[in-house]
Amino acid sequence: DIQMTQSPSTLSASVGDRVTITCRASQTISRWLAWYQQKPGKAPNLLISEASSLETGVPSRFSGSGSGTEFTLTISSLQPDDFATYYCQQYNSFPYSFGQGTNLEIK
Amino acid sequence: EVQLVQSGAEVKKPGESLRISCKGSGFSFTNYWITWVRQMPGKGLEWMGRIDPTDSNTNYSPSFQGHVTISVDKSISTAYLQWSSLKASDTARYYCARIYGSGWPVDYWGQGTLVTVSS
């Protein structure tokens, strides 16, 4: 099974900051990686698929990159609405696995 | 409008059985896999398994294999997650979600069903 490791687990930042979250896969997953945002009490929301493809309606300050085993999610200029928990997920092979999450909190 | 509407919150005792549901509408149900994801209180997302409504083919995470059953009734566009004997550690919110197929991510989620198991 593929293990997904996100870092950091918690990230404290301010509005306007540029932040990067890293996700590493235990084996190569090509570009079959998605990023989700989850707010308290809500279902996750798909932000990025295929490592770097921004979903319709997602602000352009979000971007993704990477392939193989190392991936990043970058938010170029944090907005108040961005403080949430972010998860990566590989969908290269079953079982599709999630990273443990990164809690992005206000500094 | 795409909707995945899940059944309501449940409170059960250890050892009891349970089936929760997820009804799809606004899309062609048999064109998508349905997946189930667990989120324990204050914790992250765990992928449990998926089912293909066209043939009921399933894949489970080893962590959940043998403890839950995923099924579907395509005639009513509804997927199910069931337990034959609940444990306190099954207390969690369970999400259903859809996947277009191999090589596609989860793109739409239900609202979640909270399951509480307590004696």
Image: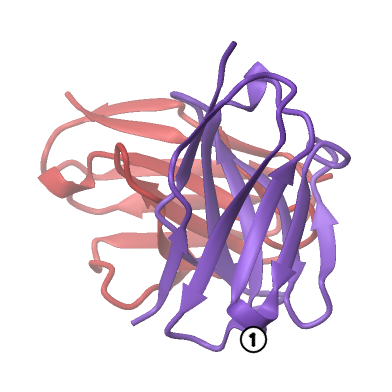
Chain colours: A red, B purple
- Which is more toward the observer, A53 or B10? B10
Quarter of the image for residue A24 reads: top right
Q: Quadrant of residue A103?
A: top left
Above or below residue A102? Residue A81 is below
Relative vertical location of residue A19 with respect to residue B11 in this rendering, above or below: below
Callout 1, which amino acid? Asn
Farthest-out residue, top: B119
Whole-percent x, y for residue A44 in the image: 41, 52
Seen at 85% across and 40% down, the residue is B62
Residue depicted at 66% across the width and 58% down the height: B80
Figure quadrant of the C terminus of chain B = top right
- Left or right of residue B3: residue B23: right
- Answer yes or no: is residue A57 visible: yes
**Chain of the residue displaying label 1:** B
Query: Would residue B118 be found to the left or right of residue A61 on screen?
Result: right
Q: Residue beneath label 1, please?
A: B31
Residue B10: x percent and y percent? 50, 36
